[in-house]
Amino acid sequence: MVPDGSVTAVVDMDAAIGYVVAHGDPVERARLSFLRTGGAPPPHIIDRIGDGQTASGGWPPSGNGRVPSVDATCFRLAELDDLGGLRGPAVDRALTWLAAAQRDDGTWQEDGSLADEAPPWAMPGDPEATLYLTAVAGFWLCVAEAEAHPYRDVPPVHGAVTEAAARHVVSRLHPDGTWPSYLAVGWHAAGLLHEQQFFYESARIQLVLGDRLTDMSPADVASMAAVLRRMNLGDDWLLEGARKRLTETQRTDGGWDSDEGPVFDVNTTLAAIRACR
């Protein structure tokens, strides 16, 4: 342990890495390799993810699906981000589809035909799901723009799309900084709004998240910390608090609990590794 008691010294990274190696599938182990060393994944790993991509550019929610899903596409973008960043033909097609799928009011909703298989947070027509998908889709488009042009030296490709998304999110915030939807809206919205220069609104959301931190599940803390780590929001007090919570909730086997059952524990652990590396 480092004498200064830093948070990263308390998190057992070796145990977390060992958990992913022991329980992860080939894609998850490749994600771990990139997060640890920055090494490029084998081409067949990227091909494995790309094989499920529809001709339009999005991913369906299930392996045999044909209709692309906003939620599934954002999940795949997060996977690809852990495999070398948001670049390459598959990513470009996904971002183009995601931008084109935005509705006239700046929001995203799933196609109505997906209602029977959509989880609650992606249910077509549901206002809470709409706000969630808008924050998440807007966030990933912002991450991609920032990665492609870190010095902001050219106009953003999807600038009008992300601005419209941010304005919708701002319109749904309550005066106290809370929002009428799922908790995960908060950290994605904080990144989206900060990148779109809604600094005051982003800061209010971060204060709300800080107040809720001690009651968050390990999966929520890991997801929030990974998002905050990905988008530089300036003051990192919330990220440091999240890392501290991860030290308190890490299991003895090195992993963290998912909210969706043991099958997703590796994904949660990868999020925690991203946040604490």
Image (cartoon, rainbow, N blue to C red):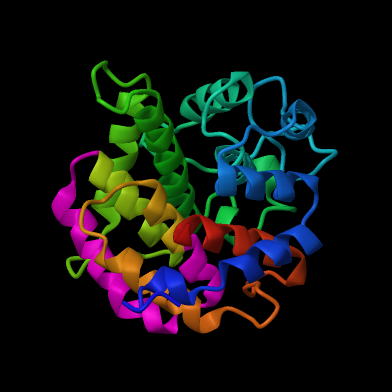
Q: Relative to 126, is 57 on the left or the right?
A: right
- The residue located at (70%, 45%) in the rendering is 114
Q: Residue furthest front?
A: 3
Residue 90: x percent and y percent? Answer: 63, 24
Choose between 242 and 193: the one closer to the eye.
Answer: 242
- The residue located at (72%, 38%) in the rendering is 60
Q: Main secondary structure of the magenta part?
A: helix
Q: Is residue 221 magenta?
A: yes
Choose between 254 and 1: the one closer to the eye.
Answer: 1
Q: Against 253, is 264 above or below?
A: above
Q: Is residue 210 magenta?
A: yes
Confirm whether residue 178 shows in the render.
no
Residue 139: image quadrant is top left
Q: Residue furthest left?
A: 200
Residue 110: x percent and y percent? Answer: 59, 43
Residue 216: x percent and y percent? Answer: 46, 78
Confirm whether residue 108 shows in the render.
yes
What's the magenta region?
196-223
Q: Relative to 235, is 65 on the left or the right?
A: right
Q: Relative to 213, is 74 on the left or the right?
A: right
Total numbered labels: 0
Residue 143: image quadrant is top left
**Which quarter of the rendered picture does the N terminus lie within?**
bottom left
Residue 98: x percent and y percent? Answer: 52, 30
Q: Against 126, is 218 above or below?
A: below
- The residue located at (74%, 31%) in the rendering is 42
Q: Residue furthest right?
A: 64
